[in-house]
Image: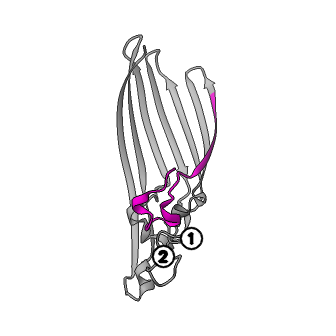
């Protein structure tokens, strides 16, 4: 990716903020005629991107000249393993019902809580449900719901390193998502 020119003084390595490399492998098995089981494994290598993986503690007890340069402060994210499991039940020729579960490692360590206030990606468990209904020969309606279970990380504030008695900070996240799609085949 092209470095973020406007943020070259903020993100490590002069604003270089690539999408981390990731690898996926999966399998789908029809258990019985109407039931399909799917499983995926994904590895996300956040440590391949300095702005994401460098510790927010890099640079020590000063903020001066510790942002934007090589090896400077980042979000401190670790590499993660993601496991995804899903079931699809073909209830009728027109209706498919789906359910899924996703578990991932938490990439954020307690030492990096302060920087991650803007990106609190601490959720580790997701549950999904959905359906697709064929309206006719060439159209379908899909509805999907996702719930990410609340998770949090607590750690010492980065500002404690600068001589300010800031105590500790806690980041937390949960999510709910609802999607509705209408599809047509041409």
Q: Is residue 7 magenta?
A: yes
Quick one: SS at disc 2? loop
Label 1: which secondary element: loop
Q: Nearer the viewer, residue 154 or 68?
A: 68
Does 82 appear above or below 143?
A: below
Q: Is residue 30 above or below residue 170?
A: above
Q: Residue 146 occupies which quadrant of the picture?
A: top left
Report whether residue 140 is seen: yes
Between marks 2 and 1, how big is the CA–CA gap? 8 Å
For disc 1, the marked residue is 71
Q: Name the residue rendered at 36%, 43% in the picture.
A: 177
Residue 94 in the image: x percent, y percent? 43, 16
Q: Quadrant of the C terminus?
A: top left
The verdict on residue 111 being magenta is no
Q: Residue 107: percent from the left, percent from the top? A: 53, 61
* Magenta-drawn segment: 1-29
- The residue that label 2 is drawn on is 66
């Amino acid at each position: 990716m092209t470095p973020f020119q406007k943020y070259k003084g903020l993100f490590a390595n002069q604003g270089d903020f690539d999408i981390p490399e990731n690898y996926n492998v999966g399998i789908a098995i029809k258990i019985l005629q109407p039931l399909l089981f799917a499983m995926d494994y994904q590895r996300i290598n956040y440590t391949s991107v300095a702005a994401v993986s460098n510790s927010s503690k890099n640079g020590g007890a000063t903020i001066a000249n510790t942002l934007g340069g090589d090896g400077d402060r980042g979000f401190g994210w670790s590499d993660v393993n993601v496991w995804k499991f899903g079931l699809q039940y073909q209830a009728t020729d027109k209706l498919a019902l789906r359910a899924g579960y996703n578990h991932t490692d938490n990439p954020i360590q307690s030492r990096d809580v302060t920087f991650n206030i803007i990106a609190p990606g601490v959720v580790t468990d997701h549950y999904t449900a959905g359906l697709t209904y064929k309206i006719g020969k060439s159209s379908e309606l899909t509805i999907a719901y996702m719930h990410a279970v609340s998770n949090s990380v607590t750690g010492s504030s980065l500002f404690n390193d600068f001589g300010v008695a800031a105590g500790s900070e806690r980041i937390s996240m949960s999510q709910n998502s609802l999607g509705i799609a209408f599809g047509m085949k041409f």
